[in-house]
Image: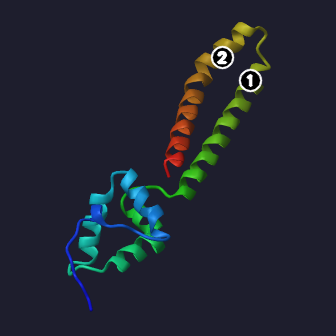
């Protein structure tokens, strides 16, 4: 026997591997957008199993479609930002070797490096926070 019912995605309860994707969408406030996506994909409706399988096996596609980065993408951006920060610090240290006083080093840091370093550090904090919310 087949039972068909109309329900909101808010009332859907995923199982197994779909729980992660559903929770991520819920935490990001994207469930309404996901529901619209489902309506576009399945204008005649679909089963709960279809929704669950979509969440479970096509989560990266869903995240990309709804403007969310995947965990892998966030981790890659963290690594790139860390490398950029490390390179910037190395540049400062190399340039600071030519300074004769601590005041000159401080002036060099403040005028040429501080803003970029702070920006990269802030970006890292935001990325790590985003990663922790996944």
Between 85 and 25, the one nearer to me in the picture? 25
Q: Residue at x 58, y 32 (%)?
A: 121
Query: Is 81 left, or right, of 17 in this rendering?
Result: right
SS state under label 2 = helix
Q: Quadrant of residue 5?
A: bottom left
Q: What mark, if any, has residue 125 been given in the picture?
A: none
Q: Earlier in the sequence, mark 2 or mark 1?
A: 1
Residue 67 spot, x, y in % from top left = 38, 56
Q: Which residue is mark 2?
A: 108
Residue 132 spot, x, y in % from top left = 54, 46
Relative vertical location of residue 26 with respect to residue 127 in this rendering, above or below: below
Q: Which residue is mark 1?
A: 95
Query: Is 131 left, or right, of 2 in this rendering?
Result: right
- As drawn, the residue found furthest toward the bottom would be 1
Q: Circles 2 and 1: CB distance less than 8 Å?
A: yes
Residue 35 spot, x, y in % from top left = 27, 65
SS state under label 1 = helix
Q: Residue at x 24, y 72 (%)?
A: 40
Q: Residue at x 42, y 61 (%)?
A: 63
Query: Is 41 left, or right, of 28 in this rendering?
Result: left
Relative vertical location of residue 87 with respect to residue 33 in this rendering, above or below: above
């Amino acid at each position: 026997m087949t039972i068909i019912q109309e329900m909101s995605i808010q009332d859907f309860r995923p199982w197994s591997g779909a729980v992660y994707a559903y929770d991520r969408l819920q935490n990001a406030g994207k469930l309404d957008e996901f529901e619209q996506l489902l309506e576009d994909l399945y204008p005649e409706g679909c089963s709960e199993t279809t929704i669950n399988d979509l969440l479970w096996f096509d989560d990266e596609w869903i995240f990309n479609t709804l403007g969310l980065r995947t965990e892998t993408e966030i981790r890659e951006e963290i690594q790139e930002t860390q490398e950029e920060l490390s390179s910037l610090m190395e540049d400062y240290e190399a340039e600071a070797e030519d300074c004769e006083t601590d005041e000159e080093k401080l002036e060099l840091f403040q005028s040429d490096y501080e803003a970029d370093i702070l920006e990269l550090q802030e970006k890292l904090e935001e990325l790590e926070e985003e990663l922790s919310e996944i």
